[in-house]
Image (spheres, grey):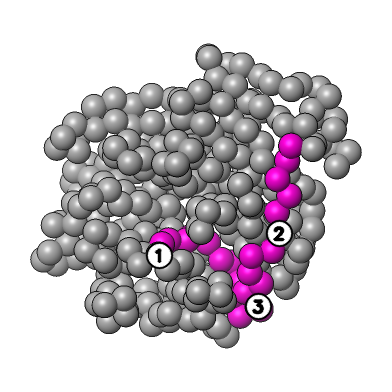
Amino acid sequence: MKYLIIIVTFISSFRLAAQEIKLNNESELIKPTLFANLGESCSTPDGMAIDKFGNLFLAVTNLASFEEHGSKILIFDDNDKPSTWFDQLPLHPITKKVHPMGIAFGPDGNLYIADNQNFAGQLNQSRILRIVVQNGKPIKAEVIVEGLGFSNGIRLYKNHLYVTDFMFENGKESGIYGFNLEDFSDNKIIMNDQDRQKHLIGTFPVGIDGIAIDETGNLYAGNFYSGTITKFEFTNERTVKSRNIIFQSNLFNCADGMYYDKTRNSIFIANLNNNSVHQLDLGTKTLNLLWINNNNNGSTGLLDNPCETIIYKGNLLVVNFDTFEGPKNLEVDTYNTISKFKL
């Protein structure tokens, strides 16, 4: 933990525009343990969701081994053991692939999925999928939106669905689109310029990624490249009422997956580049470092390209993407894991 001691010695807290980063002492950090080893057939895990029955689900994209293993949605049993719940997601007609990223259940009980076709080499071909669920069982999967740029995170609030588009065609911007579930009652939406303007709720520099919604419907979005957290407030008709940056600091530069926890009124954020996980207290605007580690294979529960967070059975779970080499992830290994933090 030498690197951590250096950070803590250098600065214990940092304020910017009435915001604070708290770098806990080493003794205050919450060391993760292993929640699940998914096995070699479940590489590049990403989004998590919990249904109305309390079941945990995980999207597995298998970017490097799609031809061998395909993509799938896993479910965890009462003993936290994963098994395949659904593996018949509709392939894209051009790429013949499907790469589920963010997932979320709607009030209708169906599972909504951001399918990232950029990972299959196709620009502006990403989609939103829906698995129709009856009595907790998957019945069929269908395409409800086509023509997104780089679909990534997805969240629902009542009948409203929001998806982050990491990168537009110009390669310089990103954004968030909003839909009403009634929009999908007829034919699927094939995004054109008019649809993009109709459904766009905000644009950003390239990299908008993590997304969270609090219990009153405020939306929070994180930028992968800057770590900036932006808050949207809405009218009763779900039009944007205000947009404000609520956290920004040069000491925090990557916000990947995010999850809102109403018990703590906090957003838990995965920092993929830095192998760290953080808690943003929305009351105090304080960002707490929960854990950070150097390069490792994730086999013991240490972070390994952390990409998504969720609170499940009172614990913080963090998915390890372990797909791209970077500052902390020096190699891609054969372990595909989820870490657990006892809060």
Give the answer, above or below, for where 52 lies relative to 334.
above
Residue type at numbered disc 3: Gly
Q: Nearer the viewer, mark 1 or mark 3?
A: 1
Residue 117, x across and y down, in percent: 43, 64
- For the N terminus, give its image quadrant: top right
Where is 132 relative to 145, above or below? below
Q: Which residue is mark 3?
A: 39
The CA distance from mark 1 to mark 2 is 22 Å
Which residue is tagged 1? 54
Q: CA distance from mark 3 to mark 2?
A: 17 Å
Say what secondary structure mark 3 lies in. Answer: loop
What segment carries the magenta color?
28-50
For image coordinates 56% across by 72% down, the residue present is: 80
Residue occupied by mark 2: 33
Mark 3 closeness class: few <14, some 14–19, many ≥20 residues within 10 Å: few
Q: Is residue 10 magenta?
A: no
Q: From where the camera sits, is residue 178 visible?
A: yes
- In front of the other: 11 or 255: 11
In-image side of 291 versus 310 (left or right): right
